[in-house]
Amino acid sequence: MKAGWKSKVMFVLMFFLMTACLTGWSGPARADEMSGSLPVFIAGSLTVPFKAVAKEYNEQYPKVEVLIEGAGSATTIRKVTELKRECGVIGSADYKIVPKLMFPDYADWYIIFASNQMVLCYTDKSKFADQVNADNWYELLQKDGVTYGRSDPDQDPCGYRTLMVWQLAEKHYGVDGLSGKLFGARGDTMRAKSVDLIALLQSGDLDYAFEYDSVAKQHGLKYVQLPEQINLSSTKHEQFYAQAKVSIKGKKPGETLDLVGEPILYAVTIPKNFPDQAKAVSFVEFLLSDKGVKALESTGQSATRPGMANDISKLPEALKKYVK
């Protein structure tokens, strides 16, 4: 019986080894085997957090060169879907636009891993800096000579979320026509992405800028904490947020995407056509791990744990343990 049992084990091992040779599979890649470049395209607001994550990731994977490139989330995704650039990991400031712009050809899963809220940033040089607060900011923005910045809604979720904040403020404060008065006014300034506004704010060219809470903290900016009812941070106010509606450019020329207000949630995914999926998975797994979350939170970026996936069955096996 023992000889027969050993023969069977040997046969199974021989079969496994032959299969591995024929398919080229060599088992999970070790950290010292992972090498080469890893392009990571992210929302501008994730630049500081992801650089912190990449630094820690390289302690474990020293031979991988993480190439971080920030832009508005929609622009980030279109680099892959329209410009056909090679990318290993995409981090979007809005989970909704991942399926809208990438499914089914370029991705079929995403994981929500972080959250945020909208704030109004200013400096000591800003007009009315000694007066602005959560009750009067919208009145001060309308005063003569006051300038305020927002990002382009077609490129950056912070841009369309700013418009949502204005719409919700109109209802919350009971000021008819407020959103229309702020939009396109003399002081209204727009740039491609929200982080582009920081230099203008610090130089005094802008008095105020609509940003994420994490970005304000990362750059040491003063800011007005907007009411929970309008800052897009809380699940308690989901129904109220949903009253805000903004349309942005869609996948094709002439198409539009209609978006409604909801709590701010960030998502990560891996483009299907990236040739080294194992390397991309290793980065996302690190991002979701205790060390990755610690690195994120050290920059003022709130993490969502456990993560939330659109379809767990489609996730790479290594990532499933991090989501619910």
Image: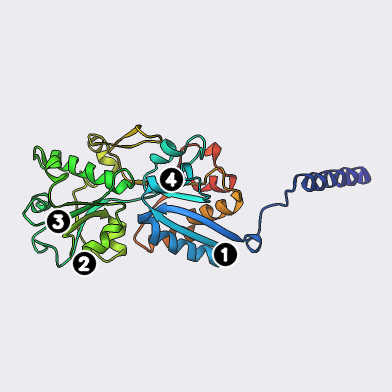
Q: Using the image, tell me which numbered label, if any, was put on residue 203.
A: 2
Q: Amino acid at mark 3?
A: Thr
Q: Which residue is mark 4?
A: 77
Residue 225: x, y in percent?
20, 55
Q: Which residue is mark 1?
A: 60
Q: Residues within 10 Å of mark 1 (few under 14, many from 20)?
A: some
Residue farthest left in this picture = 144
Q: Which residue is mark 3?
A: 147
User: Between 56 and 160, which is closer to the camera in this rendering?
Assistant: 160
User: Between 125 and 323, which is closer to the camera in this rendering?
Assistant: 125
Inter-mark Cα distance, 2 to 3 = 13 Å
Q: As drawn, is 263 to the left or to the right of 139?
A: right
Instruction: Answer whether labels 4 and 2 touch (C-beta < 8 Å).
Output: no
Instruction: Answer whether labels 3 and 1 touch (C-beta < 8 Å).
Output: no
Q: Amino acid at mark 2?
A: Ser
Residue 177: x, y in percent?
10, 38
Q: Amino acid at mark 1?
A: Gln
Which residue is rendered at x = 46% and y = 59% of the image? 68
Which one is earlier in the sequence, the residue at label 1 or at label 4? 1
SS for tag 1? Answer: helix
Instruction: Answer whether labels 4 and 3 touch (C-beta < 8 Å).
Output: no
Which one is earlier in the sequence, the residue at label 2 or at label 1? 1
Which one is earlier in the sequence, the residue at label 2 or at label 3? 3
SS for tag 3? Answer: loop
Inter-mark Cα distance, 3 to 1 = 46 Å
